[in-house]
Structures are given as C-alpha cells and as structure tokens.
Amino acid sequence: MPKITVMMDGNVHSEVTLTKERTTIGRRPYNDVVIENLTVSGEHAVLVMVGDQVTVEDLHSTNGTYIDGKAVKKQVLHHGDVMDMGKYKVKFEAPPQADEFERTMMYKPRVTAQTPAAAVASAALSVPELKGAIKVLSGAAAGREMALTKVVTTVGKPGVSVAAITQRRHNFFVHHVEGQDRMTLNGDTVGAEPVVLKHGDRIKLAGTEMQFLQS
C-alpha cells in the first residue's frame, strides 16, 4: 500500500498508510493527517487514490503545495516524490509490485482479427542485435524498465488499449492492436500503421506513460 511520511527539518512527524479514496491534509483537527503549524492551511491538500494511482490536489492553500520547487494544483504522484507544504515535507512512497507490473504491462499476445498473424507467429523469437527497453514513468510501476528482447512485445491492458512493439532490422516499431483508448506517441495518436520508435520517445497507453530507450 502507498504511504506518506510527514517530516520537518529531517525529523519524522508522522507516517500514514493510504487506505482511503481521499486522505485530507491540513491544520484543522478533522483532517486525516493533521499538521499543527500556521504555515499549513486548515484544509491544505487532499490525496485521491484511484486504483494504483494517487493524485495530490492543493485545496487553495495559502502557502501552496510544491513538488521539486514547482507549485502544483493537481498532479499524479510517483514513488519518491516529496511535497512541500508550508515548513513541512511530505514524502510519497509506492514501490511497484513486480508481479503486478508484469501482469498489467506485459502478457502473451492473443490472436484477434486485428493482430497480424506474422507478428503472433514470431512473438517467441529473440533478436539479439537490437537493444531496447520501455521505462514506466507513471503509476505504481514508475521507474521500472522492461527489456524488449522478443521480435514482438505486446503491452497494455486487454479491453482498454493494447499495442505491439516490433523489431524489424535496425529499428523498433509500435502500432495499435486493440482497444477504444488509442495510444499516443509524443502526444500524437498512433493507429494500426507501424511507426518507428526513436530513443526518448514517450508513449501513453492505457493511462500509463512510458519512455522508449534504445542503446
């Protein structure tokens, strides 16, 4: 379960495991996490948990909520993020579970009318010449890397959005396989036609943001 650690000047004030959909932080005693300091507003911020994703939302606090020195109104939290609320620092921790990551982001391709037969047939083959990986940037698995060692690697969430990353000669290609929620590459929608991937490209698929890495 994700948790937060409230600190001031390096000293731990409190640790709270996030089990509710909404966890409020503020100076008033009715908050879930109470910080009795005038630099913290009565109702300072709220942490909203939906599935594995936790979002911080500033509740129009006087001194604001900051991450990496930048004021945030509403932002998805990643493991290790530290929020500044007044004189206090609130560290967010949500280590990804390996089994959950593998189950969600990588699975054996299923033959459908939209799945190229040649791609499915070659899915188990390895191509050692190319070295590529997908790094997860958001969600509970943020920070994890998945090596692309097969001719075809299928990623995504069945029923939501599924994409295939294919190795061809000296390049990696990505294309949409199934699902209503279309994948985007650097902000542009990707269809069934394969698109060449370049080092550093950002992919958003099934609500998860990833980055393509190639060496």
Image: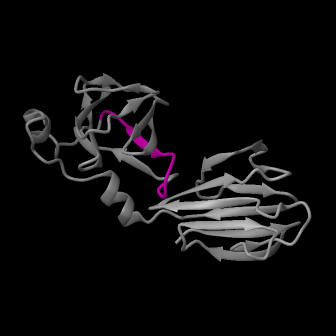
Seen in the picture, residue 80 relative to 150 is either above or below; the reply is below
In the image: residue 82, left or right of residue 22: right
Q: Is residue 134 rendered magenta in the image? A: yes
In the image: residue 173, left or right of residue 90: left
Relative depth, front residue between 161 and 152 = 161
Q: Where is residue 1 in the image (x, y as percent from the top left)?
A: 52, 72
Q: Which residue is drawn at 44% across and 66% down?
A: 97
Residue range highlighted in magenta: 129-141
Counting every numbered tag in the picture gives 0
Residue 192 visible somewhere in the drawing: yes
Magenta stretch, overall SS: loop
Q: Residue at x 70, y 76 (%)?
A: 15
Q: Is residue 176 rendered magenta in the image? A: no
Using the rendered view, name the quadrant where residue 166 is placed: top left
Q: Position of residue 104 (x, y in %)?
A: 33, 56
In the image: residue 16, left or right of residue 104: right
Residue furthest out toward the right: 38
In the image: residue 123, left or right of residue 138: left
Relative depth, front residue between 124 and 83 = 83
Q: Where is residue 86 in the image (x, y as percent from the top left)?
A: 86, 57
Q: Position of residue 144 (x, y in %)?
A: 47, 53
Residue 214 visible somewhere in the drawing: no
Position of the C terminus by quadrant: top left
Q: Which residue is drawn at 57% across and 60% down?
A: 48
Relative depth, front residue between 147 and 130 = 147
Q: Which residue is drawn at 38% across and 59% down?
A: 101
